[in-house]
Image: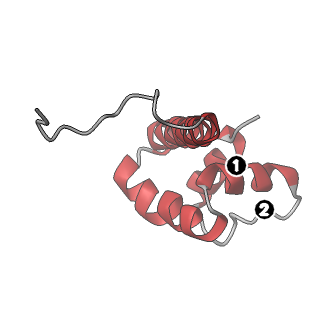
Amino acid sequence: MDLGYIDLSKRRVSAEDIVKCEERFNKGKMVASIMRHVAEKTKTPMETLYQEIGWPLNKKYGHAVDAFKLSITYAVPPLSSQLPHTDTATETQTSGPK
């Protein structure tokens, strides 16, 4: 008897798909941690940060954490035009993934 439930277990998922999903999940956790830190330091609501920074970076770079890594790597960070406030820009760039 099928109750119509969706099987969310990993047993029917390929190992390749598990790795991709876990990487995406871990990147999301990093972004959330960075955004939470920036929100606390700048006293900006997290939703505002996601609307102004996180989601546009996801769209432009595939994932916000990739943009944060680029901003640390290059002297002229790709985030500079994306960040609305100087305090937020400074805090985001110093809080990025190491």
- Packing grade of label 2 (10 A; few <14, some 14-19, many >=20) is some
Residue type marked 2 = Pro
Residue at 84% over, 65% down: 76
Residue at 62% over, 62% down: 62
Quadrant housing the N terminus: top left
Residue 39: image tag: none
- Packing grade of label 1 (10 A; few <14, some 14-19, many >=20) is many
Give the SS element for disc 1: helix
Earlier residue among tags 2 and 1:
2
Q: Which residue is mark 1?
A: 93
Can I make out residue 93 in this image?
yes
Residue 20 is left or right of residue 42, and the answer is right
Residue 25 is left or right of residue 5, and the answer is right
**Location of residue 48 by image quarter:** bottom left
Q: Residue furthest front?
A: 1
Of 17 and 87, nearer the camera is 17
Residue type marked 1 = Gln
Residue 77: image tag: 2
Task: Judge whether 74 appears above or below 18 on screen.
Answer: below
Task: Judge whether 22 appears above or below 63 on screen.
Answer: above
Question: Residue 49 in the image: x percent, y percent?
Answer: 45, 55
Of 97 and 43, nearer the camera is 97
Give the SS element for disc 2: loop
Can I make out residue 84 in this image?
no
Residue at 61% over, 69% down: 82
Quadrant housing the C terminus: top right
Question: Residue 66 in the image: x percent, y percent?
Answer: 70, 53
Cα separation between marks 2 and 1: 8 Å
Question: Residue 36 in the image: x percent, y percent?
Answer: 47, 38
Task: Judge whether 54 appears above or below 65 on screen.
Answer: below
Could you tell me if the residues under marks 2 and 1 are in contact, i.e. CB atoms within 8 Å? yes
Residue at 87% over, 58% down: 74
